[in-house]
Amino acid sequence: MSNTLDKDLLSKMDNVNVAGHESTENDDAQLANNIEQAEPTTNRDAIGTENKVVPEFYNKAQKYWAEVPATVNGMLGGLGYISAIDIQGSKNFLREIKVPGKKLALDCGAGIGRVSRNLLMPLFATVDLVEQDTAFTEKARELCTSEEGGRQNSLGEIYNVGLQEFSPSHKYDLIWCQWVLGHLTDQDLVAFFRRMRLSLEPGAYFCMKENVSTSKTIIKDDEDSSVTRPLALYEESLKEAGFRIVRKVRQQNFPKGLFPVYMIACRPRT
Ligand SMILES: C[S@@+](CC[C@H](N)C(=O)[O-])C[C@H]1O[C@@H](n2cnc3c(N)ncnc32)[C@H](O)[C@@H]1O
């Protein structure tokens, strides 16, 4: 999850112990200021919509992830130790929103299936995955079908495609997107949200869990070809796509130095 952190911060975080630490708004603001000074943009579509720019944005991300090891550490930008805290925060969030259906969930930008295996598979009879990197999906298949915990019946379809091109062929009880939406252009983000809205069972939720910037600016990361958006921009995009935001919670107990991470649950606006 390289876009969780500014790369320069990683070195500063070497000695940070997760337990008991919680980043404060002041810390975040200070860190975000440092980052944003490096490459600020206030454009609504920071990535650009010109024909050449958009494919390059996706190709570059694909190349970046192709070099990342298919491990939890790889998925979390070297911060594998935050996985348990992250999953616990997501479990609490799902408990609060009370998802009515328990049959089929979708994990978007699933990587090696960390979220599927630890969060979704214990709750849903079947979990489908969308992930653009084939090495990650091979690993996800292995991890999500291991005998341990009798999980072999829970893995559904694996779609090896970018979210910008993905159109579900099923209706889901829950669609979960985590640490991937920064890899979509603003235009593709809204179009993706619209397709997800149309792929929900009645009463189902669409949830996203993403880093957000602490100011009004979109922060570009040229290394992994992603952006970190302000929370307000995600909210605006969800509404534009026809969603109603039902619950919004900030993840607690992450180490200092990370961008704030928000979970947002939505339902189609009626
Ligand atoms: C930070 S990892 C997060 C993985 C997983 N969601 C988790 O939390 O463990 C980002 C994942 O998004 C995937 N990804 C990047 N761009 C994507 C795109 N356009 N469509 C689908 N997946 C993408 C990467 O290959 C990588 O597996």
Image (cartoon, rainbow, N blue to C red):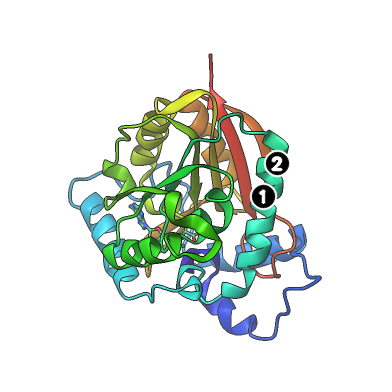
Q: What residue would you read off at disc 1?
A: 91
Q: Amino acid at mark 2?
A: Arg
- Which class describes the residues within 10 Å of circle 1: few (<14), some (14-19), or many (20+)? some
**Residue 106 or residue 217, whichever sits in front:** 106
Q: In this image, 73 relative to 162: left or right?
A: right
Query: For ligand 1, which image quadrant applies?
Result: bottom left
Q: Is 204 above or below relative to 108?
A: above
- Which class describes the residues within 10 Å of circle 2: few (<14), some (14-19), or many (20+)? few
Give residue 41's mark: none
Q: Element under label 1?
A: helix
Q: Is 79 above or below relative to 249?
A: below
What whole-number distance in Å separates the C-alpha atoms at marks 1 and 2? 6 Å
Q: Residue at x 53, y 19 (%)?
A: 269
Q: Position of residue 88 (x, y in %)?
A: 68, 57
Q: Position of residue 194 (x, y in %)?
A: 39, 29
Does mark 1's beta carbon lie closer than 8 Å to ligand 1?
no
**Furthest residue in direction left, as rendered:** 52
Q: Residue at x 37, y 67 (%)?
A: 139
Q: Is 9 above or below relative to 139?
A: below
**Residue 266 or residue 191, whichever sits in front:** 266
Q: Is residue 23 visible?
A: yes
